Amino acid sequence: MTAILAIDLRALRENWRKLAGMIAPAECAAVVKANAYGCGIEPVVRALLAEGCRTFFVARLAEGLRARSVARDATIYVLDGLTPGAAPGLREAALRPTLGSMAEVGEWAVAGGGPAALHFDTGMNRLGLAEGEAAAALTTLGGAPALVMSHFASSEETSSPDNVRQIAAFDRVRKSIQNTPASICNSSAIFLPSKPWLQVARPGYALYGGNPTPGATNPMRHVVTLHAPVLQTRIVEPGDRVGYNGQWTAKRRSRLAIIPVGYADGIPRNAMGTGEKVGAEVAIDGKRCPIVGRVSMDLIAIDATDAPDVAVQRGAPVEVLGATIGVDEFGARAGTIGYEILTGLGARYERAYRE
Ligand SMILES: *Cc1c(COP(=O)(O)O)cnc(C)c1O
């Protein structure tokens, strides 16, 4: 018996349809990098294709090849850009690089070119061409790119002045590259009051049930449910300590349940509960139970004292993520973000897809 990661492909499709409906007539693409945020590239791409999605974004060439294997005719962009020597591999699989420097633009042109995005940095200082390089990039490419794009640094902060500045900078870039579809929205940016949807939006997180509007109610349906079976229960007495280095001490007679998920499965060590810090919570039969003691490689202990007796039995399912415990909440309680929880979802889980 292992932990089971259930991926609700119907909820995923509903999430995509919701965003696509919001931004129409702009096109809603889908970001499926990092194994589709832990959910599995191939099943996710297949499901979204069936829903009408035609454009996908991945980070790496290898991810692009996996997406291509199930989406023969889709448009697929590789966000990491053109890594040195990657052009032939991209061209062979009809993958499009997002060119982010003049070196990349030059290498792509020399390799024979083909459809590509031009990626402009508008204030994040990560990947992307400078505004002033637009004319040179067009000359080197020998024409307009297939897409012109940029990326927000703070789109989940609705009132951040960064957003206003980046939109203005991207407007200037778009003026110098006319008649070309443009894209700047990730999940949270789709919900910005200024609606900078342009021609193509690129949501990832929200498709997988993450909250694109932190602080407000999550408008998306949850997609990921992770259940782990109880391996053992044990009673500890007040003063007994739990786990590596005994970092949690029972204050009352407590019933622990041990479940087979650990940091090697993507449960952050910071989800631990110690004397100083309350642990992240899981749920048994809807009752919240905190993680106690250190997160081990393969196991965690939870304090199941307050859960119903019938639900705390060997083999009974414990919800680590799901309807009660969302990815945003689990991330926050573990000192990180839901994105890291999703993309860290382990390779050891049995993945079960609900159509
Ligand atoms: C990951 C990524 C996205 C998707 O972002 P979400 O916040 O997951 O919607 C969009 N664009 C770029 C450039 C990215 O790296």
Image (cartoon, rainbow, N blue to C red):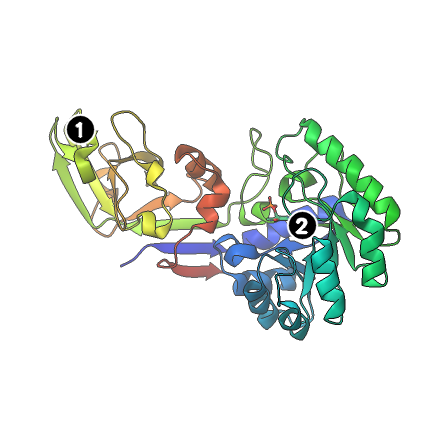
Q: Give the image location of residue 46, x and y in percent.
A: 58, 65
Which of discs 2 and 1 lies nearer the camera? The answer is: 2
Residue 288 versus residue 119 in the image, above or below: above
With 278 as the anchor, is 53 left or right in this view? right
Closer to the camera in the image, 60 or 286: 60
The residue shown at (56%, 56%) is 33
Q: Give the image location of residue 51, x and y in percent.
A: 65, 60
Report how far apart the C-alphas of labels 2 and 1 lie in the structure. 47 Å
Q: Give the image location of residue 354, x and y in percent.
A: 48, 59
The residue shown at (35%, 35%) is 280
| Position of the N terminus by quadrant | bottom left
With 184 as the anchor, is 278 left or right in this view? left
Report whether residue 243 is seen: no
The residue shown at (44%, 37%) is 336
Closer to the camera in the image, 152 or 238: 152
Residue ID for mark 2: 202
Instruction: State the mark number for residue 250.
Output: 1
Name the kind of residue labelled 1 in the image.
Ala
